[in-house]
Image (cartoon, helix red, strand yellow):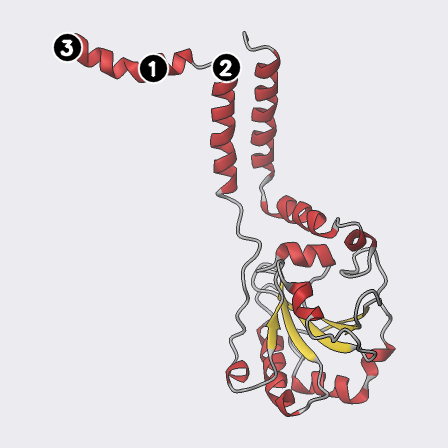
């Protein structure tokens, strides 16, 4: 009876011993890959503005996400339109990208949405939260606190973009209403950089999102995890080349 029990306990060890070094290396690499993955936060979460304005019949506050941001913006444009649809995108964040300082600015933006509910000439409004959408923000090279103003025509017409930095402590409803009434934002320099989300070099060559992921991964994964990954990848390669070692 003792012999049978010992034999049963030894079976997993014997089975493991019969595995090739390459299989063992693959299993070990998978284990550490899963371990590293557990440290990576979700880069595509929805942002829900905490606003009575949004619930009280104000102008729609669109939430831009990695999967549907372009569709959200372009869906407002009619195929035969000759007058651009204007979008104001508030680039905001939380504790990570805005150090917890964007609340006042968001509140003013939400209240502006309520005020503009009766103004058909008001621009479309949207949020881009860089805490919840880090890949999208990186692909745009955008960061809070900022206002992106877009003039969108049907494809293949270029999209005009202007950006304006905002002050997290002094931004109020009047900041947005004065900007619209004076049209002073049209004096801002038009953005034509390589990170232009519609017409830039990276967007046209389908590199913007891969670069967004690249920058995001390097920002969130600790350097020691990279070293572990490199170490085990090297070991796996060496075992594959020389399985007898």
Q: Quadrant of residue 152?
A: bottom right
> Residue 70 or 232: which is nearer the viewer?
70
In this rendering, position of residue 30 left or right of residue 217: left
| Mark-to-mark CA distance, 3 and 2 | 32 Å
Q: Quadrant of residue 81?
A: bottom right
Residue 57 to residue 209: above or below: below
Of mark 3 and mark 2, the one earlier in the sequence is 3
User: SS for tag 3?
Assistant: helix
Q: Residues within 10 Å of mark 3 (few under 14, many from 20)?
A: few
Q: Residue at x 82, y 80 (%)?
A: 83
Q: Which residue carries the number 1 mark?
A: 13
Q: Position of residue 26 (x, y in %)?
A: 51, 24
Q: Which residue carries the number 3 mark?
A: 2
Q: Work out which quarter of the rendered image holds the C terminus and state it.
A: top right
Q: Work out which quarter of the rendered image holds the N terminus and state it.
A: top left
Q: Are marks 3 and 1 in contact (CB under 8 Å)?
A: no
For the question of whether residue 142 can be seen, the reply is: yes
User: SS for tag 2?
Assistant: helix
Q: Which mark is residue 21?
A: 2
Of mark 3 and mark 1, the one earlier in the sequence is 3
> Residue 117 or 51: which is nearer the viewer?
117
Q: Residues within 10 Å of mark 1 (few under 14, many from 20)?
A: few
| Mark-to-mark CA distance, 3 and 1 | 18 Å
Of mark 1 and mark 2, the one earlier in the sequence is 1
For the question of whether residue 146 can be seen, the reply is: no
> Residue 225 or 40: which is nearer the viewer?
40
| Mark-to-mark CA distance, 1 and 2 | 14 Å
């Amino acid at each position: 009876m003792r012999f049978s029990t010992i034999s049963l306990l030894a079976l997993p060890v014997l089975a493991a011993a019969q595995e090739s070094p390459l299989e063992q290396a693959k299993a070990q690499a998978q284990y550490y890959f899963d371990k590293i993955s557990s440290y990576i936060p979700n880069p595509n979460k929805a942002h829900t503005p905490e606003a009575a304005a949004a619930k009280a019949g104000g102008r729609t506050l669109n939430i831009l996400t990695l999967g549907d941001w372009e569709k959200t913006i372009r869906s407002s444009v009619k195929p035969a339109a000759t007058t651009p649809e204007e979008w104001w995108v508030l680039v905001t964040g939380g504790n990570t990208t805005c150090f917890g300082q964007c609340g006042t600015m968001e509140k003013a933006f939400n209240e502006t949405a309520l005020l503009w509910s009766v103004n058909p000439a008001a621009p479309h409004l949207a949020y881009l939260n860089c805490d919840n959408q880090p890949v999208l923000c990186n692909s745009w090279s955008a960061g809070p606190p900022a206002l992106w103003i877009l003039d969108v025509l049907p494809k293949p017409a270029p999209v005009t973009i202007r950006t304006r930095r905002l002050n997290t402590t002094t931004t109020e409803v009047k900041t947005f209403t004065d900007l619209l009434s004076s049209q002073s934002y049209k004096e801002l320099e038009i953005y034509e950089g390589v990170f232009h989300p519609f017409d830039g070099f990276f967007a046209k060559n389908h590199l913007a999102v891969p670069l967004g992921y690249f920058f995001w991964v390097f920002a969130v994964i600790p350097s020691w995890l990279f070293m572990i990954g490199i170490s085990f990848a090297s070991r796996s390669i060496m075992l594959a080349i020389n399985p007898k070692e």
